[in-house]
Image: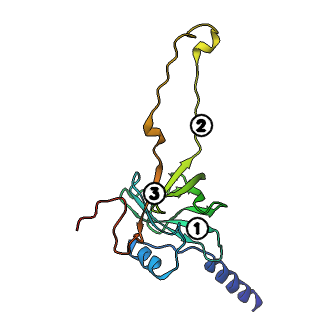
Amino acid sequence: MSLRIFALISLLVSLSTRAFNPQDMEEAQEWCDTHPLDRIEGIWSYPEDKVNVLISRVHGKDYQYAVTAVHSEGLSVTPGEKIGEVYSTADPARFRLRLFTSRKKGILGRPVDCAATLTAQDYGLAVAAKKRTWTLNPFALLPYFWRIARTSVSDPMKSLPVGMQKIYPSYDGNGSSRFHVRYL
């Protein structure tokens, strides 16, 4: 009898610490409408991958949020699938974002840590991942060769932030977005 009670208690504890896993946009919007939301919580669109995600607080954990896919045009992820986690930091506008990498045989790969910063009155989330660059200068072996002329090229596209746009709840409550023209 005590083994059944222990199993039931452990099941209830594990269910109570899970994040909400919506299966579509309507479920995610209903969840947003019925819960008090932190700045980071809501439905976000990642335009480059055409994926919409719900960022929601993990029940029982004050500074941890789950990133759950709610819509994907390319079907790269399944709606309802947890694809990452967000952790608060000492700066209320900056977060540690952990996203899972691409699939291998239907299973998400190892997580990658990123830095995420709220922008544009909390309706943008700029994401920066670790970058490794390797440069090889063949003329470094020749100390006086090409000393007079050096060139470098800067790419302003590399400085543009990559990230997500908040699509729900809207800033004025009627579904409009700060990122699109509003026609009256």
In front: 161, or 81? 161
**Residue 74 screen position, x and y as percent:** 37, 56
Read off the residue under disc 1: 65
* Vertical relation: 160 (above or below) 30: above
Read off the residue under disc 3: 164
In front: 77, or 125? 125
Quadrant of the rendered image containing residue 170: bottom left
Q: Quadrant of the N terminus?
A: bottom right
Q: Secondary structure at mark 3?
A: strand
> What type is the residue that disc 2 sits on?
Arg
Q: How many marks?
A: 3
Does residue 21 appear to the left or right of 15 in the view shown?
left
- As drawn, which residue projects farthest toward the bottom? 1
Read off the residue under disc 2: 132
Mark 3 crowd level (few <14, some 14–19, many ≥20, 10 Å Cα): many
Mark 2 crowd level (few <14, some 14–19, many ≥20, 10 Å Cα): few
> What type is the residue that disc 1 sits on?
Tyr
> What type is the residue that disc 3 sits on?
Met
Judge whether residue 71 can be spotted in this image.
yes
Q: Secondary structure at mark 2?
A: loop
**Residue 38 screen position, x and y as percent:** 55, 72
